Image (cartoon, grey):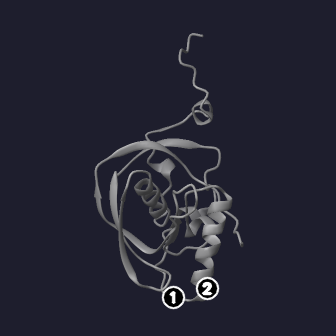
Amino acid sequence: MATRKIVTIGDDTLRKICRKQEKFDLRLSILLKDMADTMYKAEGVGLAGPQVGILRRIAVVDVTEDHSGLLELVNPEIIEADGCQTGREGCLSVPGRQGVVTRPMRVKVRFQNRKGQWNEYETEGFEARAICHELDHLDGKLYIDMMDRELTQEEIEGHIPEDDNQ
């Protein structure tokens, strides 16, 4: 298992627009594997190229608890989006912070796999949220740019008193 260093907020790499991935070779396969290993080790549900210092349009997503739903997205684009969901988001590149963000409820994404073959994938709910979040990274955007509000440390830790007067 090879892991890579995760780039954090303040690094200009996170604000750059990524270039299309042109080569589908062993180096790409190794990078995708390293990204998945890094994501799993950090207990994340997604990781994009810029988060490991690679300015290419690549991302990995897996929202399953048993790591059985890995999506490797090369040159992805959302071709359909419907509905609306508002929920909590965090980011491996923005440690210690979370916010409330509104995203589409359902998305259809078109992407290439590690061999360069085009695919389409449709999903909804949390997985749709994760895909949107990772694809934003490819365009230099972070969830903090679009959050409705930032969560307090008490909200993040789940220690919210039911009555503020106590």
Q: Position of residue 50 (x, y in %)?
A: 57, 67
Q: Residue furthest top?
A: 165
The residue to which callout 2 is attached is 27
Query: For the residue marked with disc 2, what is the amino acid?
Result: Arg
Which residue is found at the position 55% from the left and 89% from the top? 25
Depth order, front residue of 26/102 = 26
Residue 53's disc number: none
Label 1, label 2: how far apart the Cα atoms are: 9 Å
Q: Residues within 10 Å of mark 2 (few under 14, many from 20)?
A: few
Which residue is found at the position 54% from the left and 36% from the top? 151
Q: Residues within 10 Å of mark 1 (few under 14, many from 20)?
A: few
- Give yes or no for contact between labels 1 and 2 (Cβ–Cβ under 8 Å): yes
The residue to which callout 1 is attached is 23
Query: For the residue marked with disc 1, what is the amino acid?
Result: Lys
Q: Quadrant of the N terminus?
A: bottom right
> Measured along the vertical axis of the image, is residue 61 above or below residue 101?
below
